[in-house]
Amino acid sequence: MKHETPMLDQLETGPWPSFVSDIKQEAANRAKNEKNVDYQIPVDVCDDLLGVLELSFKHGRTHWKHGGIVGVFGYGGGVIGRYCDQPEEFSGVAHFHTMRVAQPAGKFYSTDYLKKICDLWDFRGSGITNMHGSTGDIIFLGTTTKQLEEIFYELTHNLNQDLGGSGSNLRTPADCIGKARCEYACFDTQHMCHTLTHEYQDELHRPAFPYKFKFKFDGCPNCCVASIARADMSFIGTWKDDIRIDQEAVQAYVGGELKPNGNAHAGRDWGAFDINKEVIDLCPTKCMWMDGKELKIDNKECTRCMHCINVMPRALRIGKETGCSILVGAKAPILDGAQMGTMLVPFIKAEEPYDEIKEVIESIWDYWMEEGKNRERLGELMKRQGFQKLLEMTGLKPDPRMVQEPRHNPYIFWKEEEVEGGFERDINEFRKYHQR
Amino acid sequence: MEYEEAKQKVIDELTKKQKSKSKFYFNDLSKILEMKPREAKKIVNKLVTDGVLEYWSSGSTSMYGLKGTGKQAGAEHEG
């Protein structure tokens, strides 16, 4: 290796796969260059990346500088400028920009496509990728300013691909695998994600928000993309009617013919399936019981925890009248201040052309763009100004389903004009009936 | 406001502040233009396309500056 990296080498001794080993492997590949690639950025970029990281460990401080003005023409996001403050010693990473590339909905790839993007990145970048970043994008790590337009041209013209979002933009929308593979999906997450990505191209590429804004689409309340925990606006599949019960299949689970949880716990003998212990008693709202051999559900009490459906998917199925709930204000910053989403729209149809959904989205943006402070997420604005203000701005009516617990967070207050006679009163009249 | 008028206003205001800073939030621009954000965005986009303004991004936040101002272009030998 070009640089001694004793501290990084220690990271490789742990039980987990190590990024250090991966980068060393790529450094060796580039040095050998068996495919005879005409590298457009320094061959030793991976060696220098390890070198500068070792130096950072030694000094206990970073050697990366600020962001930058780099980008591709007309786009205000998708490229993140990264510069090293030790360019003489580590010239390979003097410029080490990140590119975010929009992942396909549901992250469906063909091997042919993966090979093509890897070849492109070997040719014009460091060869190091992150599949995928937290927001969901394909991340290309490390290239020089000159290569950016070339890569963008290749992506958009030959790979039918676009850059993702970064900075104060709509970030690349992400979704779960949805109806493509999953019977729990209450709406077509991939279609909605793809459609809204196209609809909001301007918001994705030209930054005019106070800060980042994330959309995520989960087909059911299992929330496989964790939208409820990290998307400013999360769309979570749900149903209005009753959970469909196949009583014969319930008995097949009880009798042991069907294995619970799709046999996911087969690695160990957990004993016979006990429907009371493993399903009914675990229902958070206690809305299930056995009536003889029949399983009953009081559907109006169901909070869509999904546990019973996950345990007995052959016996219990999501309802037929499906759509999604919209929650707002979640965020998951690295340091502090994580916040879960708050219910804004309990149920909305999730069907083309998504006009009702777009109305909600745009009213939220109008509000946040006007009232949000610089670097203030939607969740923080909601906390600062109150949920009532959000409802006013979106034109939605308060609903008991927006309240977590009764008498706990009464954020809807009377206004003077809504009260007969206002807040003024005749104190003498009052004193006639109430002594001081 | 006509585009040319808006352009001049942005250039004047940002030039005035050059001594203290070279990068501005989008909110600063919509305040200068005295427009709602959505309206201001149309003008700002055009100013970027026309090469009057340029984007700056830290990765998490985006800012705007008059093209070529600030330290970076020279410092990184990209100018």
Image (cartoon, coloured by chain):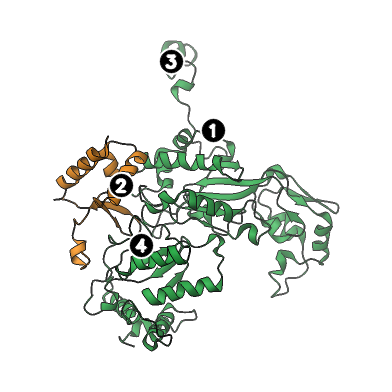
Indicate the chain on which mark 1 is placed. A
Q: Which mark is residue A397?
A: 1
Q: Amino acid at mark 3?
A: Arg
Which numbered disc flags the more N-terminal residue, 3 or 4?
4
Tally of numbered tags: 4
Query: Helix, strand or loop at disc 1?
Result: loop
Q: Which mark is residue B46?
A: 2
Distance (Cα) linking label 4 and label 1: 40 Å
Q: Nearer the viewer, mark 3 or mark 2?
A: 2
Instruction: Please determine if labels 4 and 2 lie on a single subunit.
Output: no
Few, some or many C-alpha atoms within 10 Å of disc 2 (few <14, some 14-19, many ≥20)? some
Q: Amino acid at mark 1?
A: Lys
Q: Which mark is residue A425?
A: 3
Q: Residue at x 46, y 66 (%)?
A: A158
Distance (Cα) linking label 4 and label 2: 20 Å
Distance (Cα) linking label 2 and label 1: 38 Å
Instruction: Please determine if labels 4 and 1 lie on a single subunit.
Output: yes
Q: Amino acid at mark 4?
A: Val
Q: Are marks 3 and 4 in contact (CB under 8 Å)?
A: no
Few, some or many C-alpha atoms within 10 Å of disc 4 (few <14, some 14-19, many ≥20)? many
Q: Is residue A58 visible?
A: no
Residue indicated by mark 4: A79
Q: In this structure image, what is the colour of chain B?
A: orange
